[in-house]
Image: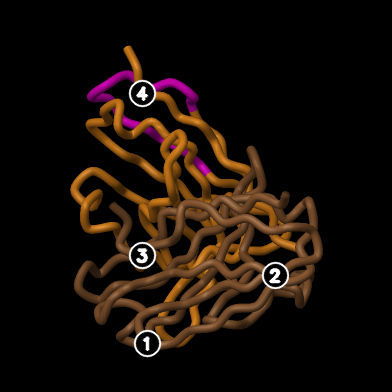
Chain colours: A orange, B brown
Amino acid sequence: QVQLQESGPGLVKPSETLSLTCSVSGYSISSGFYWGWIRQAPGKGLEWIASIWHSGTTHYNPSLRSRVTISVDTSKNQFSLKMNSVTATDTAVYYCARVDCTNNSCYGASWGQGSLVTVSS
Amino acid sequence: QSVLTQPPSVSGAPGQKVTISCTGSDSNIGAGYHVHWYQQLPRTAPKLLIYGDYNRPSGVPDRFSGSKSGTSASLAISGLQADDEADYYCQSYDYRLSDWVFGGGTKLSVL
């Protein structure tokens, strides 16, 4: 059974870059599937950020595309998220997920436990 | 304002059946894109409950069922149990936004 674990700083200063890593166990990223990031602001709903195919093909939330980079490191069985120029509105729990797709829509099949990132000076 | 509209809350007594609606538009659910549902227990990560409109992942009880018609989808939970108390989210894809879209979430209370 695939397990995912987020890691990264819990506090980021405004205008700086948020960096998170998701370590995957129980499955080799290079074997396939999409991998993605979803966030949830305190007391709010879910927001998809980005997804990446094991080969490196990416898909981004259009509203976040200019600030976000998702990447994969198959040698470490990890994938990562970088978000630059963060503001307080980026404060959220960030989840990494294994993404599966039907013939027309993708979804988060397995989720990490989440990592709270607070943007504050 | 979420692209998919869910009722903020629903409630039911143990053993009863509740239904949570998810209303979209012709650019997402109405365009035929599949709907997926998640359960988020308090202070935990979301868990996939239904995918592809009505399919249950292994381990999800058949008390949970999904359906879709037109621009709306529904999640039905029968035989309500106390540990079904959670937030439930629907999710689909919107071709105009080129984006995953979520509902705002529905808080289920078991009375």
Label 4 is placed on what type of residue?
Val
Residue B63: x %, y % from top left: 75, 73
Task: Report, in whole angstroms, how far the alpha carbon at label 2 lies from the one at label 4.
Answer: 41 Å
Between A91 and B15, which is closer to the camera in this rendering?
Answer: B15
Is disc 1 surrounded by few (<14), some (14 to 19) or many (20+) residues within 10 Å?
A: few
Q: Is residue A100 in the magenta section?
A: no
Image check: A11 left or right of A121? right
- Residue beneath label 1, please? B70
Q: Which residue is drawn at 41% across and 78% down?
A: B72
Looking at this view, is A101 or A77 the one in front? A101
Relative vertical location of residue B76 with respect to residue A11 in this rendering, above or below? below
Distance from Cα at disc 3 to Cα at disc 2: 23 Å
User: Badge 3 is on which residue?
Assistant: B4
Q: Are marks 4 and 3 on the same chain?
A: no
Q: Which mark is residue A119?
A: 4
Residue count near mark 4 (Cα–Cα under 10 Å), binned few <14, some 14–19, many ≥20: many
Distance from the alpha carbon under mark 3 to that under mark 1 = 13 Å
Left or right: B11 as drawn, with respect to A79: right
Residue at horizontal 31 percent and vertical 48 percent from the top: A69
The amino acid pointed to by label 2 is: Lys
| Label at residue B17 | 2
